[in-house]
Amino acid sequence: MRDQPLVTVVMPTWNRLPFVEEAVLSVVTQTYLHWELIVIDDGSTDGTAERLNGLRDSRIRVLSAPHIGHIGQLRNRGAAAGSGELIAFLDSDDVWMPQKLELQVDALRGSAAGWCYSQFELMDADGSLRPLPVDYFRPKSVEIVHELLTFKSTIRMPAVVVKRSVFDAVGRFSEDPRLLLGEDHELYLRLGLRTPVIVVPSALTRIREHEGRTSAVQNDPYEIMSHIYDLFIAYEPHGEHSQLARRLRARCVAYAGARQLSAGKFGRAALLFGRSLRQGVHVFDWTRALARGIYDGVFHKQRSTLNRNA
């Protein structure tokens, strides 16, 4: 890697006018100067593109297209439009600390690792810091696949810098239509199989938690996780990683069934419980999920009755 490689910063955005300029400014004020910013505007209707085009910085390119709503596709478009040897990702409602790129480029320089991530902080919509939950961030370098499969390592996309050669080699972000969320974690798994990772333990990114955040629009997390395991298994990992992924997938499908059962969607619940059995779910996981679905369904029904009678 060259001493001062160009970093392509990819920022997908959609109707983030209250936050996007602050996010862009956190790139502009980086102590590391060799970067280009590719903003992929996903059909914003709130003036986001117009505001960014008004910044008049030759290092910033705004590419607009009709709304597709798939962040993996958007990030791939942004990466393909750039030419940096390294690629970094920043969501348009988050911000970087000034030394973010400098420290992570330094960490990758001369390292065998193909990607790097850092510690991060959480903040509210107004920028006020929020405490991280205990053990939410567990830094792990080199071999990380087991921790990613079991969700014991928490990595956030704006904290990642990856070598373009590695990003391309693993196939970039999945554009599977099932992964409207979770595409970042699925990528980390493929990166982890391909190359070691290195951690910068400093908090170099601030993640803004607010109601409009894409990750706050929850689909069933268990179904999303089962899709991630499906894609990981299709990548044909060897040995213990494959066995672990298959076991965790079957468990997730059973708990997805429990959520459907608790919502009174009995047909869908039966399909998911049956699928988990065919996938070899452990009997303890299956019966626990079934009990959870029944309990939550009864509790939800009782609470709804109380609310109607109040």
Image (cartoon, helix red, strand yellow):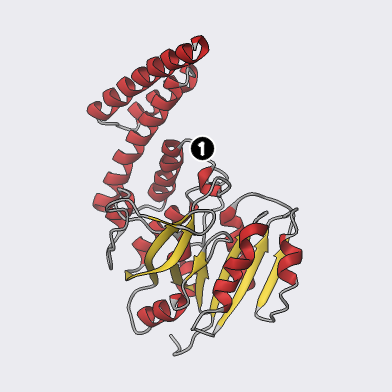
Is 189 drawn above or below residue 272 in the view shown?
Answer: below
Residue 275 sits in which quadrant?
Answer: top left
Considering every residue shown, the one lying at the far top of the view is: 309
- Above or below for 128 versus 273: below
Q: Nearer the viewer, residue 86 or 229?
A: 86
Q: Residue 188: horizontal and vertical position, in percent?
A: 40, 59
Q: Is residue 240 above or below residue 263?
A: below
Nearest the viewer among 134 and 75 is 134
Q: Where residue 244 sits: x, y (%)?
A: 27, 45
Tell me where residue 95 appears, x and y as whole percent: 52, 66
Q: Nearer the viewer, residue 237 or 42?
A: 42
The reply to whether residue 267 is in sight is yes
Q: How many marks?
A: 1
Q: Quadrant of the N terminus?
A: bottom left
Residue 111 position, x and y percent, is 33, 80
Tell me the residue at 69%/81% (across/down): 58
Residue depicted at x 39% and y 14%? 298
Q: Name the residue furthest bottom.
A: 3
Q: Is residue 310 left or right of residue 236?
A: right
Helix or strand or loop: what does disc 1 sit on?
A: loop
Kindly identify the residue that appears in the image at 41 percent across and 42 percent down. 225
Callout 1 environment at 10 Å: few (<14), some (14 to 19), or many (20+)? few
Give the labeled residue for mark 1: 219
Instruction: Tell me, yes or no, if residue 170 can be seen here.
Output: no
Residue type at the position of mark 1: Asn
Up the image or down, 148 lies above or below 197; here it is above
Q: Is residue 156 left or right of residue 242?
A: right
Q: Which corner quadrant of the image does residue 25 belong to? A: bottom right
